[in-house]
Image: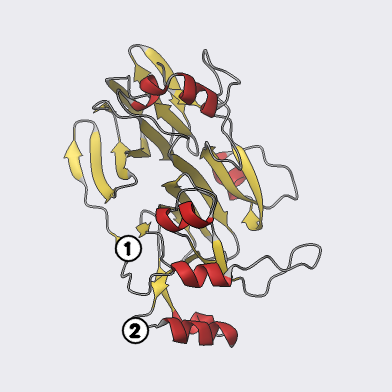
Amino acid sequence: MKPLKFKPIFMERIWGGTALRDKFGFDIPEGKKIGELWTISDNRTAVSVIEGGEFNGQKLSDIAYKFFEDIYGKGVNYERFPLLIKIIDAQDKLSVQVHPDDEYAFKYENGDSGKTEMWYIIDAKPGAKLVCGLKEGTTKEEFKRLLEEERLEECLKEIEVKPGDVIYIPSGMVHAIGEGILICEIQQNSDLTYRVYDYNRVDEFGRKRELHIEKALNVINFNIKTDKIIPEFKEIRGGRISHVVKSPYFQVSIIEINEEVKIDTEGKFNTLTAVEGNCKIDFYEDIVELKAGETVLIPASTPSYTVEGNCKVLKAYI
């Protein structure tokens, strides 16, 4: 099976902006605050549609169901494609939030999966910050008190970020994206978010967004300790690579390509998301072009492929 590309899915958000148009050239309507681009999704909220090739116009869910062995590999199948990849344009800060784990989501959210994710910082204004967990020693009782007093910022752990930084966000960790940051997010295929605090913002109709405080308090892990992951690169033929995330839910590598790099799939599906530059994927003399801001799915039935160009891509697999 040939690599699969997808039509972009845009999500309007109260905190969004125009970076997806300004940086990647996507056709975004004037006056719209586009906060998220879903580059590959088989989620109940939105399902990716294949663009180009023999399956043009068909849904990822249908092709993955029909050709699951080609997509996932022998003896492997998923009810839905297991990863969701987004590019997030945070022109304003996002809500303080937390995601449940698989066990809680399955029990209380109609059999859904939990949500563990990672962030790759594509761009950030000088001094931009993220909320990355809680300050050491914060208890559930103190958290609740500060929340009631609208002083929650006092217990949030903020870190400054710059392009190229990586953050791992396990389920149960309180987090928030700060303003002026462009992120590639790779996550479990789940759209479950429990908002804890939203700075009392209102939408165009004067309505506050829904909070999910009780559920959030049920799933927050007050003992999680995390920080930025500093990529450590090793030279490979045609570029260099850094394996930045290894978790039960996905593994992610950053690959910087300056000529061409050959990649073996080892019988696993790969997703490649271009975060800088454009490249070509050579699949047995069949070329698929990949532009910055796009994701391509390499089926497990593809033994190997070559990426050519001057670019940076995030490779994800399970």
Residue at 42% across, 37% down: 273
**Numbered circle sitting on residue 137:** 2
User: Which secondary structure, mark 1?
Assistant: strand
How far across and how far down the image is residue 120, in percent? Answer: 40, 52
**Residue extending furthest toward the front:** 107
Q: Amino acid at mark 2?
A: Gly
Q: Is residue 144 visible?
A: yes
Which is nearer the eye, 48 or 293? 48
Q: Amino acid at mark 1?
A: Lys
Sequence-wise, the earlier of marks 2 and 1 is 2
Q: Residues within 10 Å of mark 1 (few under 14, many from 20)?
A: some
Pair 2/1: label in front: 2
How far across and how far down the image is residue 170, in percent? Answer: 37, 59
Q: Quickly name the residue at label 1.
A: 228
How far across and how far down the image is residue 74, in percent? Answer: 30, 22
Tell me if 240 is positioned left or right of 112 in this view: left
The alpha-carbon separation of the residues under discs 2 and 1 comes to 20 Å
Tell me if 94 is positioned left or right of 218 in this view: right
Tell me if 118 is positioned left or right of 200 in this view: left
How far across and how far down the image is residue 72, in percent? Answer: 36, 27
